[in-house]
Amino acid sequence: MTRKTTYITAGGLALPLLFLSLYSVRETEFALVTQFGRPVRTVATAGLHAKWPFQNILWFDKRLRIYNPRPSEFLTRDKKNLVIDNYVAWRIDDPNRFVQSVGDTPAAEMRLHDIIWSGLSAALGTQDLDSLVSTSADKVQATPMLDQLTATADRAALTQYGIRVVDVRIKRLNLPEQNKQSVFARMRAERERIAMQYRAEGEQQALTIRANADRQKEEILSSAYKDAEKVRGAGDAEATRIYGQAYSKNPQFYRLLRTLDSYKKVLDDKTTIILSSDSALLKVLTRGEAGAK
Amino acid sequence: MSTLLTRPSDIAELVESPKPAPVRRRRRILAWLLVLWIVSGIFIVSADQQAVVTRFGAVINPRVAPGIHYALPWPIDSVYKLKVHQLRRTVIGGEIPDAVLGRIQPASSEFLSGDQNLLNVRVVAQYSVSEPRDFLFATEDVDRVVKAVVESELARRIARTPVDDILTTDKIAIQNDVLKTAQHALNDYKPGVELSSINIENVTPPAEAADAFRGVAGARADANRLVNEAEGYANDLIPRAQGEAAQLAEQAQAYKDGKINRAAGDAARFNEVAVEYAKAPEVTAARAYVEAMEQILPKLKKLIVDSNGNLDLTVVRRDDDAATNSNGAIQK
């Protein structure tokens, strides 16, 4: 027996033992170390770990996962039916309890479904539809309700199944198929009302604008008339003053000239006048120079 | 396994004595394999990537920047490379092919608005990796997480908004709000992603009520048209009235100026004449009178009668022509 064979023998024994007693845990996993089927400890930190060669390991995914239960119908406190689609964010927290009470993911989801469904139907039974769906934001109470539901579901799932329920949220609110037709009818009626309102409002606004324009026009024109008449009056007054000033210097001559001027205007070719031969104009004609006296 | 088992014996031989040729060759091959194994730990992270290095499953370097790096070779270290800046898309309210083909699937796209109207909404969320370590190891299915969270926040936001606002004015606000709240909720789950955009691709009323919604749009257009027409009327009417007003003002001003000028002219003329009149009132008056008569009388039909005689009007009517003739005679 040489040294060489000793090495080979030692290696042949040591290596398999090494492989059996070392294991690496990934970031995504829990390792549950079992000894003859009995869980001994849970390893949650990733990295290289050691165990006895006769111990076995069960792996569990410790990542967060999303479970989407099928949408189900719930009744609110005010007796309205709602179809709610929710999701549950969960992860395995205690592999030991998980493997004992549940085993695998589909089974876990079934349990979660039961917990959440009963929790949700109880919670919704105390809420009006208004507190889930409403245009006034302060009425909507969905978030506190779900937070509470998450807390109770988490407590139950953790103690019973070793599952941590991180969050329960409503993904979708909808109405049951059989209610939809009436909702559509209501929507249509509502739209028609709104359309009518738009038209009426448009008409009202248009009429207001037109009336306002008419009023402005009247205002502009009447005020222009007022100003214009004032200006004309001022002109008349000024002209009167000028005439008065000029003519008052010699009223008699003015009367003569003005009268003669008015004759020029008043008398035209349609006028027939009868002149006496005694008139100032014709006196000279009939009597000669004596007439001019 | 066999090489591993034989290796210790090789080393033993190496220490002892000079070896025959086949043994040396085998040793050289083993040395080369060892070198190759060590070199295999070199890895390159390209510019758009970041890498995470784990040793026996545990993260030892959560963020390796682009460049050339070394990690211990398999099976000790593992390298995960990620395109961190790449935008990943997920569609809520339908599938991506639906979006391309313009199809709507009521079951997956119907949302309930605050005033209990149903609406088909399709939203595209885009996100990128913010924390490679969480992205790789914290959640089972990142896309599913993002989808669930965005959908939940979207449903919540829509459930407190009236349908009209969703269809018209609130789109941008909804996108921004959902982006903010969904990111907030995601941070609790640590999927290692950052939402970069929430985009409402499509909001439509359900087919059963679509025509009524179009009717509203039509009514709104009608109302706008009525208002526009009225505004057009006003815009036409008022400037026109203003023009008319300006015209009135100008006319009045013209009247005033004319009147005053004419008065001034008349006054000036009168004054001039009056000065002369004052010098010889009787003659001037007579001249003025006669001159005026000269202007007036030619146009007229005249009958001249003796101051003692009485006027026989029948003669005037019958003998109009004669009178006119005599008129000419007088004129001469």
Image (cartoon, coloured by chain):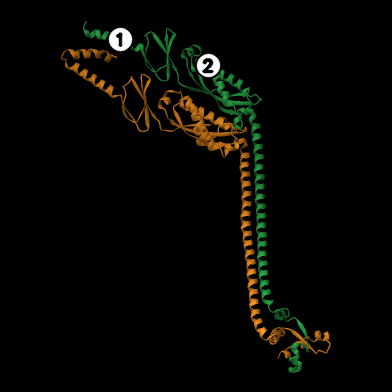
Chain colours: A green, B orange
**Total number of numbered discs in the rendering:** 2
Amino acid type at circle 1 is Ala
Which quarter of the image is occupied by the N terminus of chain A?
top left
Chain at tag 1? A
Q: Nearer the viewer, residue A278 or A49?
A: A278
The percent position of residue A75, horizontal first and vertical second, equals: 63, 23
Q: Which mark is residue A157?
A: 2
Amino acid type at circle 2 is Ala
Q: Which mark is residue B15?
A: none
> Is B10 located above or below residue B162 in the figure?
above
The percent position of residue B190, horizontal first and vertical second, equals: 46, 25
Residue B325 shows in the view = no
Identify the mark nearer the N-term, 1 or 2.
1
Q: Nearer the viewer, residue A209 or B120?
A: A209
Q: Is residue A104 left or right of residue A278?
A: left
How packed is label 2: few (under 14 Cα within 10 Å), some, or many (20 or more)? many
Which quarter of the image is occupied by the C terminus of chain A?
bottom right
The percent position of residue A187, horizontal first and vertical second, equals: 64, 35
Which residue is found at the position 65% from the left and 49% from the top? A206
Chain at tag 2? A
Q: Is residue A88 left or right of residue A126?
A: left
User: Circle 1 is placed at which residue position?
Assistant: A14
Using the rendered image, report if marks 1 and 2 lie on a common chain: yes
> Is A176 located above or below residue A9 in the figure?
below
| Separation of marks 1 and 2 at Cα, in angstroms | 44 Å
Q: Is residue B297 left or right of residue B116?
A: right
Quarter-of-image position of residue A216: bottom right
Residue sticking out furthest to the top:
A1
Which residue is found at the position 75% from the left and 84% from the top? B301
Residue B331 shows in the view = yes
Local secondary structure at mark 1: helix
